[in-house]
Image (cartoon, coloured by chain):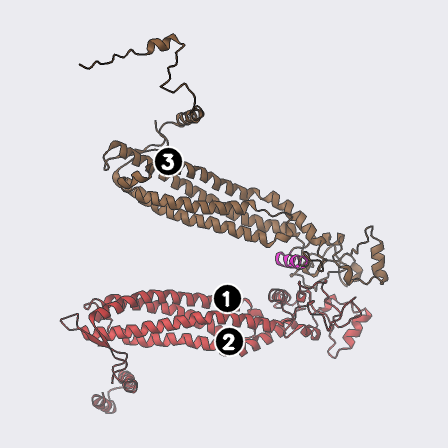
Amino acid sequence: MVLLKMKFPFQKRVRLAQGLWLLSWVAMFSGAITFTMGAFLKTELHRRSEVMHSMDIHIVPNLLMAVGLASVGINIFAGKVCQDSLDPSRFPRWKTFLPPFFCFSVFLTSLLLVAMILSFALQPSLEESLKIGLKNGIRFYKDTDTPGRCFQKETIDRLQIEFQCCGNTDYRDWFEVQWISNRYLDFTSKEVKDRVRSNVDGRYLLDGVPFSCCNPASPRPCIQYSLRDNSVHYNYEYQTEELNLYSRGCRQALVSYYMGLMNTIGPCVLFDFLLQMAILVSLRYLQTAMEGVIGQEDVEIETDGYILEKGVKETLLETKEKVKKLLQFAQVGDASATTTDAQPEEEKPATA
Amino acid sequence: MAVLKVTFTKTNRDKLAQVLWVLNWVSVVTGVTLFSLGLFLKVEIVKRRELMSKEIVSVPNMLIFVGLTACAINFLGGKICYDCVDTTKFLRWKLLMLPYIICTFFFTFCILVGALMCYSMRNDLEESLFLGLRDAMRYYKDTDMPGRCYIKRTMDMLQMQFQCCGNEGYRDWFHIQWISNRYLDMTDSGVAERLRSNVEGKYLIDGVPFSCCGLHSPRPCIQHQITNNSAHYNYEYQKEELNLNRRGCRQALLEHYTQIMQSIGLIVLIIWLFEVSVLTGVRYLQTAMENVLRLGDPDSESDGWLLENSIADTARYNFNIIKNLGKCYQVDDDPNIDVPSTSQQAQENVPVKQIPVAQ
């Protein structure tokens, strides 16, 4: 019982081959675009790698780049096969290469779908990674004299200015961390001593934020210190003040940014996947149609094209037997000749 | 004695026509490039319109105009060169070609002028930026006045993006009141004192807005009481370098625009050279085709040149034409009117013609 059989007269075969050749060029460009988008996503993720704890999310751009490159190769090969299929004398040399080629290409193309699914599935992992990374960044903000951490201050400041965000969840995260280094605190002053003593860990905590949290859209000059104290600033109520600082947290800002990027890349990847599958299906039809012509005298006869010669279950069983045979041939090569190996060989012609 | 004469065989002429056809299409693309460069420059200037006292519109408009005209001229040139392969089709264009070449020659001057304008824009721009930034800083506090309410935001974004502070440096902020009276407690003695110490009653402080803060500073930003060493622990403002942005915004913007202008100027110069070479090729093709027609045989060799006579002769000839254009309606040259000649030599030189009598 053949799967999805179609009849192919000579003209239809020719048109299929020509159309497929053109389509393979389009798919080649589409593959190159997928590669470029994967590379772009990877660079964007790499740029903020200092505030990310784990690199799990990098699998998405890696998959896109790998499949993009591979699909360029696949489509060049498909184009060559199409060119040769119009000439029945040149077509037979591709015969042995095509079945493994199909398995390989279908596997690679399905990786595109996997990448798309992963981009949604890994969102919680990305958020967690950013949460830890930002927490560390804020904790080490003051350590500009410690090697390995001296650029955290600049990184966090640039991040907050560029993404218009403040802190991890929001600006209150800065109240829980000492972000002013002890080098710049006068320990003889009463105010500093009070603050340090009032805290269990002896940290200098204050209700203030760094300058990078300031919102330029605010109508009044930025209030960074004594944010909770209405009496320190004239005409100021922190409960109703909205524009003074950035209200968004950096974790949410970064997650939205990356999700936005992946949602833009998603449709293009889906298009590439559909195009590639269409090419593979058409190439399979072309291959099976041409196989009917090989050996015939009249090239212009009508032949049948199909996806699978037998049904899905039977084809799977056959492939399983073939793979078993290959494995056992390998075993015969390793071990010395034994009668136990001879028996399965006798059984095989019966089942094939 | 022709200027730079070159002999062309039939195949040479055909190849020249084909090459020029391709080059003309490439020139259409360069025309589009010129247009987009002008558009890009215009957008960059309009983006910072609030910081300039007068917008510099001449340079980008010139580039846009030149770009569009280059597209049109080279499109026509492409059509002409395509037809030049065939002598019969060339006859269509024969009368148009010389005016076309002259127009294109003057047009290349426009491209050159455009390129030179790019380099000369700097002085105008510096003046405009100085006045514009001074006004922007003055209106920084007026976030409640319509027309000026976005200046604070523009100025803050500028200082953060270009990592600059003030006009010349951060001290410019000490001379203006950048905190609005709405946020000053007039009952407070400190505020009242500051206002009194000033002739114009302005609230001046030795502080700067937050956007002047340097990103590379190892310590949290000190924006207020900058010149007061005792107000901050372990701080000496004379030695402090990284705390605030040291560059003035005028300098920063000027450098930014100068870089853009220099790149654009270089590209326009290259396009100009390309256009001149295409024009030279078209001139050679025109003279070669005209000589072929003069010789009569379409397959023969012909000469092509830039100018038929030397430069001095051509200049004199054209000058005479222009002079005589003015004498269009004068009587001297009209053959129907009998003008008595005053010179005896002229009389003797007039040959006596014998009218043949019909027999």
Residue holding disc 3: B98
Distance between the alpha carbons at the discs numbered 2 and 3? 69 Å
Q: In this orientation, which residue lies closer to the viewer: A87 or A184? A: A87
Residue holding disc 1: A43
- Which chain can be seen in brown? B
Q: Position of residue B6 (x, y in %)?
A: 32, 34
In the displayed structure, B111 sits above or below A9; it is above
Query: Residue type at mark 2?
Result: Asp
Q: Residue furthest front?
A: B359
Query: Residue type at mark 1?
Result: Thr
Instruction: Point out the image quarter for the N terminus of chain A.
Output: bottom left
Q: Residue furthest left?
A: A297
User: What's drawn in magenta, residue-wise?
Assistant: B151-163
In the displayed structure, A337 sits above or below B323; it is below
Residue holding disc 2: A56
Whether residues under marks 3 and 1 lie with C-beta atoms below 8 angstroms apart, the answer is no
Tell me the chief SS of the magenta region: helix
Crowdedness near tag 1: few (<14), some (14–19) or many (≥20) residues, C-alpha within 10 Å = some
Residue A306 left/right relative to B196? left
Residue B66 left/right relative to A340? right
Q: Which image quadrant is residue A68 in?
A: bottom left
SS of the residue under disc 2 = helix
Q: In this orientation, which residue lies closer to the viewer: A56 or B185? A: B185
Q: In this orientation, which residue lies closer to the viewer: A141 or B157? A: B157
Q: Residue under mark 2: which chain is it in? A: A
Query: Residue type at mark 3?
Result: Leu
